[in-house]
Each structure stands twice: as C-alpha cells, then as structure tokens.
Amino acid sequence: MSTARPVLEIACNSVASALAAQAGGADRVELFDNLEQGGTTPSHGSIAVARERLRIPLFVLIRARAGDFHYDAQEAEIMLRDIQACRALGCDGVVIGALTADAGVDVALCRELAAAAGPMGLTFHRAFDAARDLDDALEQVIGLGCQRVLSSGAQASAEAGRATLARLVQRAGTRIAVMAGAGLDAGNICQVARASGCRELHASAKKPRLSRMRHRNPALLGLGSDWMQSDVEQVRALRSALEGI
C-alpha cells in the first residue's frame, strides 16, 4: 500500500458544514444540498460563499433532483448550467454521474458534463453503485477522464462493500482513484481503508444541530426543527484515525 497520506473528503450539506470540515482537517469538501435525499446541487449563493471562505479544494455535487440517475433533456440542461456556474465561481471540481435506463453509464451525457467542466476536476458519484455491471462502469468512468469514483462497493455501506472496493482498486490501478464512502466514521474508517486499499475516503461527519427556536409547531412534520451538520470534532476524529495508516 502507498505511504502517501490518505485523502479525507467531507460530504457537506451547507457552508457551515464545509467550514467545520476545513477546521477539522479535511483535505477536500464535497458541497451539496438535501442530505436526506442523497444530495442535490446546492444554491448558487451557497457555492459562492463556500468558494470565498474555503482554503481547501471545493467540489460541488451536480445532480438535478433526488431519485434515480436517469435524466431527461431538461434535467441535463440544468446540470450543464450548474457546471458553468461552478466554473465561473472558481470551484476546484464537480461531482457528476448519469445512467441509461438499462443502468449503464450514460456516456453521451457524461461527456457533455465533463466537457462543460473544462479544467475543473471530476469525480463520478454514487450513480456508479447503481450501475448494472461495476467493471464495465469503471472502464467507462475512466474513459470520461474522471480523477476518482465514489463508491460503497454497491452496498449500503463501504464497510459492507469493502471486498468489492478492493477488487475495483486492483482493476483501476493507477488509472483512477476509488474513493470509499457511505457509513464511514472514526470507528471503521481505518478498517475500510486497509481492507479495500482505498487511499481516498469520504464521510459526512454529521451531528444533529439543535434548533434555537423557543416555539415549535408539532403539526409541521419536522419544519422548524433540528437538522444535521458536519461537526468539527467528528472530522478531527476521522483525520486522527487515518493518521494511523
């Protein structure tokens, strides 16, 4: 295994989460919205403020909606425009992914997204885990010019998928980084890194933030209540755990 320091990317659902990731020692931020739905593209304002305040690399999730990864022409146009906005704001990279109806990589659309990104870095997101054939999908993602692919080994967690991740790492060689993500915390991140051979790890380090509202309407089904946010100490714990590899 390489002796290079493992890369810790924190999945951040807000600018506050991104700043917590930076303060905790993260190497890179993936910024998105709608954590509970697997993530969608954050607002222009969130991206702009994050870019202004972060000193570490900022990658932005490009996903037009929650749900599956098979997009129509209108959704593709939205994602292309979001990539253009990220490029104009000076983001370091974008996180893309799209599948065909038969669960292959939508190479045609992804090529358009990659072309729009220009010099920005490219990560292929967990649409990869929904692909019908991971080996074929990996070759297609490599062909798109992505620097990394985020994966749990097509399982609910990276810990459960570590054997598949190890196989993907071997297949990828030096052509692309396989970044392990889903369900990682300070207690299992080293085990997953060692078992899989992944040198890039992706975690949310999230913790509930308590609302300061003194009055809440119980009929609003969660509106105006607590929320999840990346936590500085949890990021530090992840960083510290990885120092042992």
Image: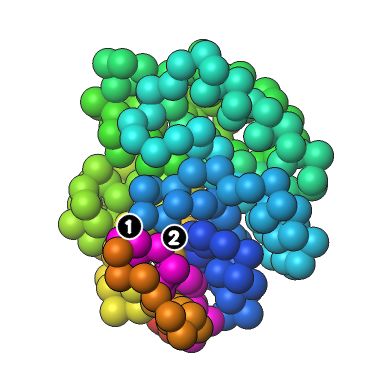
What is the three-letter code of the residue carrying label 2?
Answer: His
User: Which mark sits nearer the N-terminus, 2 or 1?
Assistant: 1
Where residue 182 appears, as percent x and y from the top left, is: 32, 57
Residue 168 in the figure: left or right of residue 177:
left
Q: Is residue 21 visible?
A: yes
Q: Between residues 51 and 56, which one lies in front from this camera angle?
A: 51
Cα separation, mark 2 vs mark 1, equals 7 Å
Tell me whether the residue at label 2 lies in contact with that at label 1, contact meaning CB atoms closer than 8 angstroms. Answer: yes
Which label is found at residue 30?
A: none
Residue 107 in the figure: left or right of residue 133:
right
* 32 vs 135: above or below: below
The residue at 42%/55% (across/down) is: 35
Quarter in which the N terminus is drawn: bottom left
Residue at mark 2:
202
Q: Which residues are magenta?
A: 220-236
The residue at 71%/52% (across/down) is: 45
